Image (spheres, helix red, strand yellow):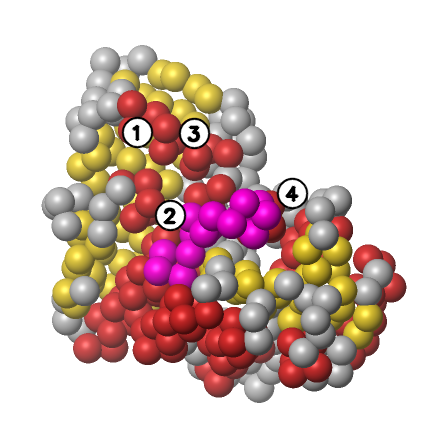
Amino acid sequence: MIGIGIIGCGSIAIARHAPEYHARNDCKIIGYYDPLTERAEKLAAQYGGKVFHTVEELLEDSEIDAVSVCNANKYHAPVTIAALKAGKHVLCEKPMATSVKEAQEMVDAARMTGKFLMVGHNQRLAPAHARAKEILKSGEMGKILTFRTTFGHGGPEFWSQDKGRHTWFFKKGDAFLGAMGDLGVHKADLIRWLIDDEIVEVKAYVTTLDKKDDKGELIEVDDNAVCLLKSKSGIYGTLTASWTYYGEENNSTVLYCTNGIMKIYDNPEFPIEIVKKNGEKVYYKVGSIQTNDNQTASGVIDLFVDSINSGKEPEINGEEGLAALRIVLACLESASTGKTITL
């Protein structure tokens, strides 16, 4: 039985981590920490376990073998490193850190301690993305030439626990990044995994267009990003992240290949739609993707716990998280300098 500690008891812990750990019969939530104690108390009342009053107290508990780090972005690196050094496996939410230096220190700590570090990039675990990867590997689509990948919704103030304009997601000191850290990093991880290639060059516009804080001023972090990416083998595409898709969520990826077009989560009825070169259409009815309104099992907790049980490092490890973060930070640098950035 694997003992679990949850650090940070906001929306992601409430919707995914706590219920998904609880649903398994090979792990047990030992306890929770959140600076707002009542949040930890609510999860303890619902799923069992105790409430810790400091991170240090939780990490000292010998019953805890692994932790989920679900607090604000700026705490991801220090808490993860402390947990690894305390002998715990770590599942860290994304973005894994606020700098390449921090992320590298996390990776180094995992290697030094021999503990697993996994980053919560759940997109590649979504059923249609997994099936799309199989189709691409088969060669059916030919060579990928270009792509567009998009993740946009109405913004975190509608679903985070501290709902409204005062949410920590809007504060640079806590979040560091806005829509690019919340959504863009997901697509950065997904696209490099789908095309099976590294992004080596970016040109980006990362800006704040509409979101306002509780003082009525534009928020300190980005609410929109449009990025042009180039891969090592010469695949070009766009990555868009937005907190201003007020009508409906868009979580789609389209790959334009030599044998046709693959649309993933673009057709509400069929998660994969393939349009062949001759116009023939092929539809795949595979599982739907998670949305803020439809919090189905993410697969992240299952992969993490299964990895601990098997002793095999999870596929979405610290190095994978770092690769996605590098893309996002390069886009941020491009936007601030107006230059094309080489990774």
Q: Earlier in the sequence, mark 1 or mark 4?
A: 1
Between 238 and 123, the residue placed more toward the observer is 123
Q: Please state which amino acid type lies under the numbered disc 2.
A: Leu
Between 42 and 102, the residue placed more toward the observer is 102
Real-space CA distance between mark 4 and mark 3, rounded to the nearest whole angstrom = 18 Å
The residue singled out by tag 3 in the image is: 131
Q: Callout 2: helix, strand or loop?
A: helix
Pointer 3 local density, CA inside 10 Å: few below 14, some 14–19, many at least 20: some
Q: Please state which amino acid type lies under the numbered disc 4.
A: Thr
| Residue name at image x 30 percent, y 48 percent | 192
| Residue name at image x 30 percent, y 29 percent | 136
Real-space CA distance between mark 3 and mark 1, rounded to the nearest whole angstrom = 9 Å
Magenta stretch encompasses residue 296: no
Pointer 4 local density, CA inside 10 Å: few below 14, some 14–19, many at least 20: some
The residue singled out by tag 1 in the image is: 136
Real-space CA distance between mark 3 and mark 2, rounded to the nearest whole angstrom = 13 Å
Real-space CA distance between mark 1 and mark 4, rounded to the nearest whole angstrom = 26 Å
Q: Please state which amino acid type lies under the numbered disc 1.
A: Leu
Q: Is residue 336 above or below residue 134?
A: below
Q: Earlier in the sequence, mark 3 or mark 2?
A: 3
Q: Give the residues in magenta.
A: 306-320
Q: Earlier in the sequence, mark 4 or mark 2?
A: 2
Pointer 1 local density, CA inside 10 Å: few below 14, some 14–19, many at least 20: some
* Disc number placed over residue 296 in the picture, else none: 4
Between 302 and 233, the residue placed more toward the observer is 302
Q: Is residue 45 above or below residue 76?
A: above
